Amino acid sequence: MDTKIIKNRELKLWEALIPVFALIGMLAYNVLFAYNGPDDNALGGSNQFILLLGGAVAAIMGYFTKVPFHKMLDEVANNIKSTAGAILILLMVGALAGTWMVSGIIPSMIYYGLQILSPAVFLPATLIICSVISIATGSSWTTSATVGIALIGIGGALGFDLGMVAGAVISGAYFGDKLSPMSDTTNLAPAMAGTDLFTHIKYMSLTTIPTYIITLLLFIILGLSVDVTGEANTDDLLNSITASFNVTPWLFLVPVIVIGLIVKKTEPLVALLVGTLLAGIFAIIFQPEVVNGITGANSMTFKSAYKGVMEAITSKVVVPTENKTLIDLFTSGGMAKMLPTIWLILCAMVFGGIMDAIGALSRISESLLKLAHSTFGLFASTVGSCLALNITASDQYLAIVVPGKMFAKAYKDKGLAPENLSRTLEDTGTVTSVLVPWNTCGAYQAGTLGVSTLDYLPYAFFNILSPFMTLIFAAFNIKIRQLINTIK
């Protein structure tokens, strides 16, 4: 992606902040007042339009500060181009979720999971499982799209609040994403700060491990304190699953192959496509009645098999069940379910692109940098800059790239090793992106897991605690490596 930072000498700080305050105000009214009913869905379109309105406010500021309109459009185009891969992955995740449900993969995971994962250990087990998968794959997105979806189903069947389960999934997924050498953000942060990958990972573990331990303890306490009713209804749920699907361990071949492909550094799109196609074949082999039920066919033919799998891939499919608890689990939206999320990402890129084009992102970052009179102030300014960019630019990569380029010289001037900066970029830029509903990461996780950002936010303990941990280390001068110490 394009990592240049656009400056605009004509733009003052208060002018750069006008679009930000306008966006926050409109989004707050939209989510907290206009669309706060149980049947309301701000993701259905209103948040998207508000992002466009925020972009329009930024464009007006650009007009008055002599930024050509074509320059704004060019930057919007560059931003949208940079999300092409994410959009394709979203579509494939929708297809994967649809075929994994129809083929019985997700129901089988839930069937066996209900027998293994008791309510008392479910939340910490979810955290650990997602952590291991994310470290192995290097992708929080892939973790959520595979085991995350299954764990959401198991948690719902056990009677857990889905916000809690999603918080555990996301906490584990982003822990692994931060420490995996295969993660794109884990490679991007040291590249921006000027250090090497493994120095960055080793140094980042100093703040990441304590944060993870606290997160694990919180989920252990939460799991023991929450009263759930799923355990008493397990037999009914198990019987309902086997009544609708042919449950067999052979179905686990598909997720094992997908995870194996990703561990082998296969492109995520390729791995997800393989997982979708294999699941479609397994649906025909193991769930012929389900496939026939989708199309209304009396017997399996090539036409009915083809149409049934294609329906699962592209659109909403509901597998009938008499158990009301499993209705949502047995419903899949396919690619179509991801369209509101893609819509949100595109509108967010319009806002972020215009903000970058008019120089607002650069002006805000420079102002934060001026507040850094001490070592703690420098760390705090970096944290603030990353948070601001995740909110305004709506993209975690920009939240790493822009502060990384802006603050690199300041860290060097204060005699601080570059890994201090790379660690802070990840402790804030990477993990807080998922806490912003209109950020690409927040939109993706909400769309993939089927849990709104505001519902899982209070339970995404790892993501919330990480910025505070890096500030605590800075405030008490814990493991703050000096530049002289890195010279041999």
Image (cartoon, rainbow, N blue to C red):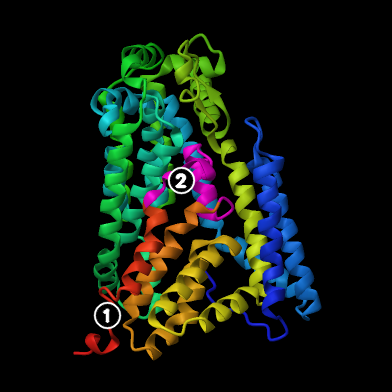
Q: Is residue 133 visible?
A: no
The answer to whether residue 471 is above or below residue 344 is below
Please provide percent x and percent y for residue 214. 29, 52
147 and 10: which one is in front? 10
The answer to whether residue 476 is above or below residue 302 is below
- Tags 2 and 1 touching, CB below 8 Å: no
For marks 2 and 1, give the CA distance.
Answer: 32 Å
Identify which residue is drawn at 25% across, 66% down.
Answer: 206
20 and 404: which one is in front? 20
Of callouts 2 and 1, which one flags the residue occurring earlier in the amino acid sequence?
Answer: 2
Left or right position of 343 against 425: right
Please provide percent x and percent y for residue 207. 29, 64
**Magenta span of residues:** 437-461
Left or right position of 436 against 220: right
Q: Is residue 61 visible?
A: yes
Please provide percent x and percent y for residue 360. 65, 74
For residue 247, which quarter of the picture?
Answer: top left
**Label 1, on which residue?**
481
**Label 2, on which residue?**
458
Identify which residue is drawn at 46% across, 15% down.
Answer: 300
Q: What residue type is labelled 1?
A: Arg
Identify which residue is drawn at 36% across, 53% down.
Answer: 462
The extreme left residue here reads 488
The answer to whether residue 377 is above or below residue 307 is below
**How busy is the neighbourhood of tag 2: few (under 14 within 10 Å), some, or many (20 plus)?**
some
Query: Which SS does the magenta portion mostly show?
Result: helix
Q: In which quarter of the image is the C terminus?
A: bottom left
